[in-house]
Amino acid sequence: SRCFVQNDAPKTIDIIFVTADKGLCGGFNLQTIKAVKRLISEYQEKKVNIRIRGIGKKGIEYFNFNQVELLDEVKNLSSSPDMQRSSEFMTRSIKDFKDGIIDGVYLVYNGYKNVITQELHVNKILPVDVADYDCEKSKNSVLELEAHDEETMLDSLVTKYAEFNMYYGLIDSVAAEHSARMQAMDAATNNAKQMVKTLSVKYNKARQEAITTELIEIISGVESMK
């Protein structure tokens, strides 16, 4: 099947990115955008045609502002992942890959690692690289198929695999987004508190200087009247 054949000289690829619909989450969106730009540069050097499909308002706005053409633009999905909408979005890339219109599909997003760390993912969805998976664990498993069903079953499995990866990327991204926003807001709160503290010290110092000046003027005035 074409879905398992690694193409060392692709002519056209799809790059799908996932960013947030909102800001105020530190460098969360910028990391994904930079990764997409690196991937674009890498394949442009190889003379590969690139189709970019975007999910998330912030990434879409960035590429639109920089006049980079996007094949698809979807908003309000990264903030509220939905399996049906996610699968419908992925269907186009899957179909075009099976039809030979494109030779690869990449998914770029910032995922959740822990409460304070996000992890950038640049995943090749299609073609499927079986070397990435441990087949030894399932070598004793038996799946009985009728001869004429093999291609149909394989086609269905690859479709579900790609759809699952798309949906997982969305839920992983939204978890990381909330984590990044929590960090950004915590940092902003701490910075605000530090600023209030600094300004309070400056205010008190200026107030003390003003009082001292007034006292000196009063004392000087009294002395001059003697």
Image (cartoon, rainbow, N blue to C red):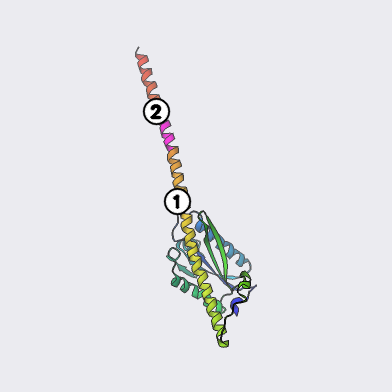
Say what amino acid the circle numbered 2 marks: Ala
Secondary element under disc 1, as helix, strand or loop, is helix
Give the CA separation, mark 1 to mark 2: 37 Å
Residue 52 magenta: no
Closer to the camera in the image, 80 or 143: 143
User: Which circle's residue, 1 or 2, is located before the other in the chain?
Assistant: 1
User: Residue 210 got which mark?
Assistant: 2
User: Which residues lie in the magenta part?
Assistant: 199-208
Residue 126 is situated, as x and y percent measured from the top left of the image, at 57, 73
Secondary element under disc 2, as helix, strand or loop, is helix
The correct choice, above or below, for 27 with respect to 137 in the image is: above
Residue 130 is situated, as x and y percent measured from the top left of the image, at 62, 73
Residue 160 is situated, as x and y percent measured from the top left of the image, at 51, 75
Q: Residue at x 37, y 18 (%)?
A: 219
Residue 207 magenta: yes
Residue 84 is situated, as x and y percent measured from the top left of the image, at 44, 72
Label 1: few (<14), some (14–19) or many (≥20) C-alpha neighbours in 10 Å: some
**Residue 129, can we see it?**
no
User: Residue 173 got which mark?
Assistant: none
**Residue matched to label 1:** 185
**Which quadrant does the N terminus fall into?**
bottom right
Q: Residue at x 43, y 42 (%)?
A: 193
Say what amino acid the circle numbered 1 marks: Met
